[in-house]
């Protein structure tokens, strides 16, 4: 049996274009828009890379940000990004609009919140 291949990961958000620009700046993957549509009017926008599942952002009216690590709106999921240097990675994500989470549970990774509150981690690249 051939197993299904993960096609994309979708994040709910209030403004897909703005969040796509953040993750594009984080990963270096270009924002993919549809011909004939203004990016700010699109209901969902993708970052597509040939060898990775797409990262997609979908407009949700009345979006409520997750709380981390606890709270009334649990995180539900998060993304991990591998880096060679945690300090350098931290400087990069803060410079593009991420916030460092108050609670940091480990030493080999750091938790951040994207501009609309989704938690994500920078983790040390394993050799």
Image: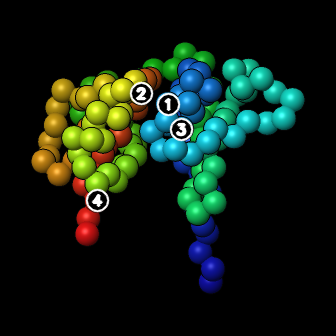
Quadrant including the N terminus:
bottom right
- Mark-to-mark CA distance, 4 and 3: 20 Å
- Mark-to-mark CA distance, 2 and 1: 7 Å
Circle 4: is it few (<14), some (14-19), or many (20+) Cα within 10 Å?
few
Q: Can you give x and y, in whole percent of width and height, for residue 100 in the image? A: 26, 29
Task: Check whether the beta carbons of the residues at disc 4 and disc 2 lie within 8 A of each other.
Answer: no
- Mark-to-mark CA distance, 2 and 3: 10 Å
Residue where numbered disc 2 is placed: 96
Q: Can you give x and y, in whole percent of width and height, for residue 30 in the image? A: 61, 42
Please give the name of the residue rendered at 73% of the width and 36% of the height, measured from the top-left corner.
33
Circle 2: is it few (<14), some (14-19), or many (20+) Cα within 10 Å?
some
Q: What element carries label 1?
A: helix
Please give the name of the residue rendered at 55% of the width and 16% of the height, measured from the top-left corner.
62
Q: What element carries label 4?
A: loop
Residue where numbered disc 1 is placed: 22
Q: Compare residues 70 and 33 and report the one nearer the observer.
A: 33
Which image quadrant for residue 20? top right
Task: Check whether the beta carbons of the residues at disc 3 and disc 1 lie within 8 A of each other.
Answer: yes
Which image quadrant for residue 115? top left
Task: Check whether the beta carbons of the residues at disc 2 and disc 1 lie within 8 A of each other.
Answer: yes
Disc 4 or 3, which lies upstream in sequence? 3
Q: Compare residues 124 and 114 and report the one nearer the observer.
A: 124
Whether residue 67 is situated above or below residue 23 in the rendered picture: above
Whether residue 27 is situated above or below residue 39 in the rendered picture: below
Q: Can you give x and y, in whole percent of width and height, for residue 63 in the image? A: 51, 20
Task: Check whether the beta carbons of the residues at disc 1 and disc 4 lie within 8 A of each other.
Answer: no
Disc 2 or 1, which lies upstream in sequence? 1
Compared across the picture, whether 31 is left or right of 97 comes to right
Residue where numbered disc 3 is placed: 24
Compared across the picture, whether 54 is left or right of 35 comes to left
Q: Residue 125 carries which label?
A: 4
């Amino acid at each position: 049996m051939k197993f299904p291949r993960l096609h994309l990961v979708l994040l709910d958000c209030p403004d897909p274009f703005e969040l796509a620009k953040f993750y594009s700046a984080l990963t270096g993957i270009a924002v993919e828009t549809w011909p004939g549509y203004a990016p700010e009017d699109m209901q969902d926008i993708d970052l597509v890379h040939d060898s990775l599942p797409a990262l997609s952002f979908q407009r949700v009216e009345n979006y409520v940000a997750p709380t981390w690590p606890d709270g009334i709106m649990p995180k539900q999921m998060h993304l991990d990004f591998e880096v060679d240097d945690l300090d350098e990675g931290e400087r990069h994500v803060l410079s593009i609009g991420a916030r460092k989470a108050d609670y940091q549970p480990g030493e080999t990774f750091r938790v951040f919140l994207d501009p609309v509150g989704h938690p994500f981690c920078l983790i040390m690249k394993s050799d």
